[in-house]
Amino acid sequence: MKIAIFPSGLSFGNTLQCSLSFLKHSEDWLCWLITTEKTHSISKKIGEKEGRIRVIPLDDLKKAILNIDNNVEFQYLIGPGTREIQLTCISTLFNNSLTPTFWFIEENISKKNNNRFLRSYSDSRIDLIPIDEDQVHFILPIEDINFIQSKGIKWDIKSNRFTFKVTFPPNASLLGKKKIRKFQDQVIQDFQDSKNRFGAHGVVGSHEPIPNTWPVQSLDRFKKDGFRGGREQ
């Protein structure tokens, strides 16, 4: 039996894609997602729906290793998670006399294609499977689906991320400073809530061109909070 092991990162989509790609490669594989306080809730959403994925807090990794059979082969994915967490996981494996096969994410980007796949240092390759919206909805609990639908959040299959796009009301150009501030307060809070649910790197925020009647500070505020977009000409 082989166990693919890696720290889950701050992106729901990337964690989901990597883990499901390993599992699709062979029915004999399992996947361990090693989590911190920041990433546990994201990974838990995945582990609750996929029986071959086990979610393990970083502090419990040694205990989990000691409870497995000697014939297990570990496959370690380098990339997701912080460098500190990566080193802690690898050290825990080595300190328990386990030498994993190392994998990394490789990209082959061209004008026509943006192919991503997993490759081992022994030159084995596993294609990263595309994750569509139906799969995302199957994994997520109903409260997350309701949140997505209520905020107009979309799933982008190419980037493996959610997209949060701000659209302005028809009378946006007529709004005064107080109403502009109130509008921004709400959408920025919604964007932050979405990142809390799906990871800081799991959601991309953007906005339509800001009305040219709005103060310059409005655009600066959107940029400061991580939104992409410009201003009406």
Image: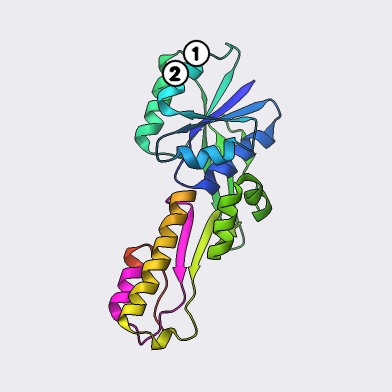
Q: Magenta span has 49?
A: no
180 or 230: nearer the viewer: 180
Q: Residues within 10 Å of mark 1 (few under 14, many from 20)?
A: few
Q: Is residue 39 visible?
A: yes
**Colour style of the rendered protein structure:** rainbow
Amino acid on which disc 2 is placed: Lys
Q: Which residues are magenta?
A: 200-222
Q: Residue drawn at (69%, 25%), measured in percent from left and top?
A: 28
Q: Which residue is mark 1?
A: 66
Q: Position of residue 215 (x, y in %)?
A: 30, 81
Q: Determine whether 69 is above or below 148 in the image.
A: above
Q: Position of residue 83 (x, y in %)?
A: 36, 36
Q: Residue drawn at (41%, 20%), measured in percent from left and top?
A: 92
Amino acid on which disc 1 is placed: Leu
Residue most toward the right? 27
Q: Determine whether 120 is above or below 74 in the image.
A: below
Q: Which residue is mark 2?
A: 62
Q: Residue drawn at (61%, 58%), measured in percent from left and top?
A: 113
Q: Position of residue 119 (x, y in %)?
A: 57, 37
Quarter of the figure that contains the N terminus = top right
Q: Determine whether 58 is above or below 113 in the image.
A: above
Asked if the residue at tag 1 contacts the one at tag 2, i.e. Cβ–Cβ closer than 8 Å, the answer is yes
